Image (tube, rainbow, N blue to C red):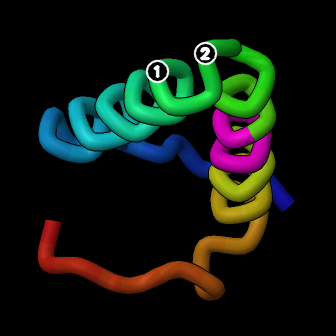
Amino acid sequence: MAKRKIVWTNSAKFELKEILIYWTNKTKSKTYSKKINDLFTEAVDLLSLHPKIGRTTNN
C-alpha cells in the first residue's frame, strides 16, 4: 500500500509548536518535547499508511 501525503494546516502546525514549547518550558528540558514530537511523527506515519483510521474532513 502506498503512503499518502499528510497535509498539516497552519493552525495545526502552530498548535504542535506551542505544545512542544510549553513542555520544554515546563520541564526545562527538550527531552520530553522530543518524545512527544516522536509520538506525533509515528502517528502521522501510521495515518499515512492507513488513512481510514483518521478523521475525515471536507478538505
Please state which amino acid type lies under the numbered disc 2: Lys
25 or 19: which is nearer to us?
25
Farthest residue toward the top?
Answer: 29
Q: Which mark is residue 33?
A: none
Q: Residue under circle 1?
A: 25
Where does the image place residue 51, in percent across and percent down from the top left?
61, 73
Where does the image place residue 46, in percent across and percent down from the top left?
78, 60
Q: Residues within 10 Å of mark 1 (few under 14, many from 20)?
A: few
Q: Which residue shows up at 64% across the image and 85% down it? A: 53
Q: Residues within 10 Å of mark 2 (few under 14, many from 20)?
A: few
Where does the image place residue 7, in percent across and percent down from the top left?
36, 42
Q: Residue under circle 2?
A: 28
Please state which amino acid type lies under the numbered disc 1: Asn
Q: Which residue shows up at 53% across the image and 80% down it? A: 54
Disc 1 is placed on an element classified as helix
Magenta stretch: give its range. Answer: 36-40
Q: CA distance from mark 2 to mark 1?
A: 5 Å
Is 58 colored magenta in this rendering? no
Q: Quadrant of residue 49?
A: bottom right
Disc 2 is placed on an element classified as loop
Secondary structure mostly seen in the magenta stretch? helix
Number of numbered discs present?
2
Image quadrant occupied by the C terminus? bottom left
Q: Is residue 45 above or below residue 10?
A: below
Position of residue 10 in the picture relative to residue 17 (left or right): left
